[in-house]
Amino acid sequence: MSSVLLLPGDGIGPEIMAEAAKVLDRVDQLFGLDLQIDHGLVGGAAIDAHGTPLPDDTMAKAHAADAILLGAVGGPKWDAIEAGKRPENGLLGLRSGLQLFANLRPAILYPQLAAASSLKPEIVSGLDILIVRELTGGIYFGKPRGVHVNEAGDREGFNTYRYSEPEIRRIAAVAFEAARKRSGRLCSVDKANVLEVTRLWREIVTSMAADYPDVELSHMYVDNAAMQLVRAPKQFDVIVTGNMFGDILSDEAAMLTGSIGMLPSASLDANNKGMYEPCHGSAPDIAGRGVANPLATILSAALMLRYSLRSEAALKAADAIERAVGTVLDQGLRTADIAEVPGQSVSTARMGEAVVAALALD
Ligand code: NAD
Ligand code: IPM
Ligand code: MN
């Protein structure tokens, strides 16, 4: 038996989660996974019900579960709420409370979607990049932080970009190991020409390279990396970077795959416990209309089976989900974000049901 906690969240979160839940139910039946599925509130939905974005009950369920699948949090309804109590703090609290320091964001172009990418097909065809984003440190969590009145009497906002040596070592080790299992190329992205914290990052990553002689390590400044990702993205295999640079570069990489609605992610602790979520947000502009692309969430469920549940049957189920996504794309099904012909698109539910129908044992 494996316990899975579903946290739909806000905006399109419940819509895309409903489809991922159907897919999980079906692979549970097909592969005999014996999943025990529970639900919880996080983000704006939890603020509305309990006055806090991460209720104790949700945190307790998250600790108890083998793995967590999250939709998305946030939206204009809660935008005026003060820092620290916003929907996004629910997500950040889960990440740091569960010590999910390693965020894997694979950007893979399905060949069927080459025309949906904003780049020319020859630049993106065969694209398969893994962004390894540090998730529980850096400027997102560094202290001191806040807004105060400075000596000149002006209000001043400040955050602290901070990484300790152990934090850098553990995320770099994840990235070196991932590169070793792939093509053996690792690019560490930093701003070592300006920021001391990333100078230390570069020094430590460089010193670790001797332990991974089979990995070819390179370094790139983040501004150049942002440019190279759209100039020649296939030069990259594994990218490792800090929390904020990884956030930005992964949204950029998403567009190479056709849509942010295609990019799944896995957030892992040191023992492969994980939370899985699409890279996109709650998409308030399309929420409630049944048009969001559920594939990033469905593919996140596949990552969950592979990285956290890990039984023989779970690995087969993960492969089956990824194959089924390929099948529905072969069938020409497209949500609006990946449609080649505007207007010729299917709903969120139709896409989810098509994936369910395409699931097969092998
Ligand atoms: P967003 O990712 O929600 O949306 C950006 C654009 O992409 C929008 O035009 C949206 O319609 C589109 N989009 C996103 N997901 C899509 C999908 N599955 N199918 C089709 N189109 C999709 O980013 P944003 O607008 O900057 O943020 C909205 C809210 O989401 C904010 O409150 C933000 O904090 C939150 N957010 C949450 C997460 C998360 O929960 N992991 C991630 C990013 C942003
Ligand atoms: C993401 C999101 C989050 C982040 C926000 C909602 C806290 O953008 O998961 O990419 O910045 O990490
Ligand atoms: Mn983001």
Image (cartoon, grey):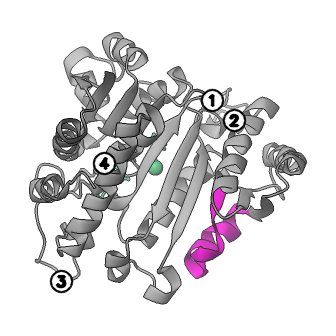
Residue 238: in magenta span: yes
Spatial CA distance of label 4 from label 1 is 32 Å
Q: Residue at x 33, y 43 (%)?
A: 301
Badge 3 amino acid: Val
- Sequence-first disc among 4 and 3: 4
Question: Taking the image as drawn, is residue 194 in sight?
Answer: yes
Left or right of 335 in this view: 57: right
Q: For the residue labelled by badge 4, is the local secondary structure a helix, a strand or a loop? A: helix
- The circle on residue 145 is 1
- Residue 251 position within the rendered picture, expressed as x and y whole percent measured from the top left: 47, 59
Neighbor class of circle 1 (other Cα within 10 Å; few <14, some 14-19, many 20+) is some
- Tell me the quadrant of the picture where the C terminus can be found: bottom left
Instruction: Please tell me which residue lies in front, 121 or 318.
Output: 318
Mark 2 / mark 3, whichever is N-terminal: 2
Q: Is mark 4 within 8 Å of ligand 1?
A: yes
The residue to which callout 3 is attached is: 341
Q: Is residue 183 above or below residue 208?
A: below
Q: Residues within 10 Å of mark 3 (few under 14, many from 20)?
A: few
Residue 51 x %, y %? 28, 17
Front-most of residues 183 and 252: 183
Numbered tag placed on residue 297 in the rendering: 4
Question: In the rendered image, is residue 86 in sight?
Answer: no
Part of the protein shown in magenta: 221-239
Instruction: Measuring from the top left, give residue 235's x and y in whole percent.
Output: 65, 75
Q: Quadrant of residue 61?
A: top left
